[in-house]
């Protein structure tokens, strides 16, 4: 068991009275199965939603949490709020062959890419290992026959940030581009460098604003900006089952009820209360608040008060996700003794 400092009752959480407690119970019952703690409570919650004709009421769902859990605040080293961002499962048009518009190849995992001590590296012919190429080098060396699909460059860039996506081809075929590997280099956001260079205003660096800038300058100018992020993602093609993608915990991500977290501070299957107010990007919603499950991770998600909220599939989710950059507070739900 992890040590727990101070806790507060569930009823004392900001916004608890306004929560959809029944939706929270369903999210908990689905996500807790991947955890290793509080399995008796997990079993109880799952029994509540599968007990036949009589399903739980919102009052019973609320009582389940209040009777069984307290909430322990997560804290940053300096006591300041952390950061909430958001992500989504993008849906993009794609082509099976190159065209002037669809000129960015979707690449499969290379044969010489190997995971070594948790990081992808190049395995040389003599058996030695070395760091893998950065984004610019990979794109510069890619050959047409290596492509498993073709996309607009800015769409591929954003799909790599999200880690997966859904593709629709010109013949109506659909597939899921699933994460297969990365080049082992850290993620670097391009929003701040673009603002620092005067390419976008400081409060106008939403995902949609960045995408529009890249699309308007498709070619060498856009590639130079995208190369500021050296991290590169390789994909495999899976069937599109119409559902939500799996997170790192290997279960489908419930829309608006799943977060990516830092595994050094959280465990998959943790139930978490988030409160995030004061986002200042153009088009941002005022706040995000509610019970979510820790079911995923990401290379940019580091620290005890850092989360990436999964918003669902498609364009609307993507527009919203691009404007989420909110100060964050988090609480871990802790079973009562």
Image (spheres, helix red, strand yellow):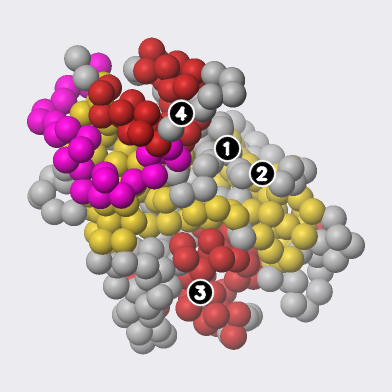
For label 3, the residue is 208
Check the image and report above or below for 82 versus 31.
Answer: below
Percent position of residue 201, x then y: 35, 84
State which quarter of the image contains the C terminus. Answer: top left
Labels 4 & 2 near each other (Cβ < 8 A): no
SS class of the residue under badge 3? Answer: helix
Say which label, 3 or 1, has the lower sequence index.
3
Foreground of the two, 102 or 166: 166
The CA span between labels 3 and 2 is 24 Å
Residue 118 visible? The answer is: no
Q: Are marks 4 and 3 in contact (CB under 8 Å)?
A: no
The percent position of residue 145, horizontal first and vertical second, equals 82, 57
The residue that mark 1 highlights is 252
Q: Secondary structure at mark 2?
A: loop
Residue 23: image x %, image y %?
45, 40
Instruction: Tell me how far mark 4 sits from mark 2, CA to CA.
Output: 25 Å
Marks 4, 1: nearer the viewer: 4
Q: Can you tell which of label 4 and label 2 is closer to the viewer?
A: 4
Q: Which residue is mark 4?
A: 56
Residue lying at 33% horizontally and 26% vertically, measured from the top left: 64
Q: Are marks 1 and 2 in contact (CB under 8 Å)?
A: yes
**Label at residue 243:** 2
Q: Residue at x 66, y 44 (%)?
A: 243
Foreground: disc 3 or disc 2 = 2
Q: Is residue 201 visible?
A: yes
Q: For the residues marked 1 and 2, what is the alpha-carbon distance in whole angstroms?
A: 8 Å
Q: Which residues are magenta?
A: 1-24
Marks 3,1: beta carbons within 8 A:
no
Q: Is residue 6 above or below residue 200?
A: above
């Amino acid at each position: 068991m992890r040590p727990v400092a101070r806790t507060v009752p569930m009823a004392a959480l900001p916004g608890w009275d306004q929560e959809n407690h029944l939706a929270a119970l369903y999210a908990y019952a689905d996500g807790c199965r991947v955890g290793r703690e509080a399995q008796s409570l997990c079993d109880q919650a799952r029994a509540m939603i599968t007990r036949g004709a009589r399903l739980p009421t919102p009052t019973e769902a609320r009582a389940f949490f209040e009777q069984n859990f307290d909430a322990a605040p997560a804290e940053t080293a300096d006591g300041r709020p952390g950061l909430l961002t958001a992500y989504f499962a993008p849906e993009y048009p794609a082509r099976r062959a190159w065209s002037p518009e669809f000129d960015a190849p979707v690449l499969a995992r290379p044969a010489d890419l190997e995971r070594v001590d948790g990081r992808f590296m190049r395995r040389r012919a003599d058996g030695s290992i070395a760091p893998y190429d950065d984004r610019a080098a990979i794109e510069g060396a890619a050959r047409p026959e290596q492509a498993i699909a073709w996309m607009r460059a800015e769409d591929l860039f954003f799909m790599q940030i999200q880690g997966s996506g859904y593709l629709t081809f010109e013949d109506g075929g659909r597939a899921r581009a699933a994460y297969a590997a990365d080049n082992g280099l850290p993620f670097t956001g391009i929003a701040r460098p673009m603002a620092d260079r005067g390419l976008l205003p400081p409060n106008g660096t939403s995902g949609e604003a960045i995408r529009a800038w890249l699309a308007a300058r498709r070619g060498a100018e856009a590639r130079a900006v995208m190369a500021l992020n050296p991290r590169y993602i390789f994909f495999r093609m899976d069937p599109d089952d119409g559902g939500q993608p799996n997170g790192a915990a290997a279960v489908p991500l419930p829309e608006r009820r799943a977060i990516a977290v830092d595994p050094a501070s959280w465990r998959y299957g943790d139930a978490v209360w988030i409160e995030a107010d004061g986002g200042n990007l153009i088009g941002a919603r005022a706040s995000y608040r509610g019970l979510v499950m820790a079911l995923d991770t990401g290379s940019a998600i580091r620290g005890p008060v850092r989360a990436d909220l999964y918003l669902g599939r498609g364009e609307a989710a993507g527009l919203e996700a691009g404007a989420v950059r909110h100060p964050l507070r988090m609480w871990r739900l802790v079973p009562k003794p």
